[in-house]
Image (spheres, rainbow, N blue to C red):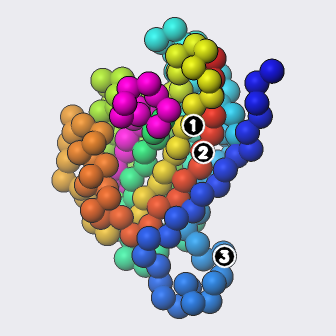
Amino acid sequence: MRPTYALLLISVLIVADKASAQDGAPGDTFTLTSSSVGGQATTREVFDGFGCTGENRSPQLTWAHAPDGTKSFAITMYDPDAPTGSGWWHWVVFDLPATINGLPMGAGSTGGAGMPKGAVQSMTDFGTTGYGGPCPPPGHGAHRYIVTVSALDAESLGLDPEAPPAMVGYTINSHALARASIVFYYER
């Protein structure tokens, strides 16, 4: 029997408006939610390849309460449980305009038809751009898929779609004002 995991909503505030932090108002915390993915990935999110059969559709995402000074957003999806010694980057998006607060399901499709103008989907560990869903090795147990939205202090990271995930992650971290994450699981 497979274990059931609850959807985890993690909200990490790196830099916040001091008044909000002093008030302790939970409604003012940068948050990320999804109406399409719960605690477990479904065939909608699962990769289609490498022995997996799924629709490879990125989850719907909505974020709220970005901190003052946010000029753009970035999204990453990472599997720390991949047996690579360095995890696996499934989705890397940056230069999302500060005027948006979410993406529809499937926005991460290769070619980025659902992405806002100016957004960049860069390389994943699949060796392509765009969303690449969960596809852990059979019998390896449940893997965690951490989807993170970062509020950034720069309108553009100045990187191109061929930038490797580690370089994008480094650049995101150097501009992050706040991060919010959700975690879901998948095993086969």
SS for tag 1?
strand
Name the residue that disc number 3 marks: 26
Disc on res. 183? 2
Alpha carbon separation for disc pair 1 and 2: 6 Å
User: Of label 2 and label 3, which has the lower sequence position?
Assistant: 3
In the image, the segment drawn in magenta is 80-96
Q: Position of residue 49 (x, y in %)?
A: 48, 12
Alpha carbon separation for disc pair 1 and 3: 26 Å
181, 152: nearer the viewer: 181
Whether residue 145 appears in this view of the structure is yes
Relative to 179, is 144 above or below?
above
Q: Quadrant of residue 41?
A: top right
Disc on res. 144? 1
| Label 2 with label 3: CB-CB less than 8 Å | no
Q: Residue at x 30, y 64 (%)?
A: 175
SS for tag 3?
helix
Alpha carbon separation for disc pair 2 and 3: 20 Å
Quadrant of the snapshot with the N terminus: top right
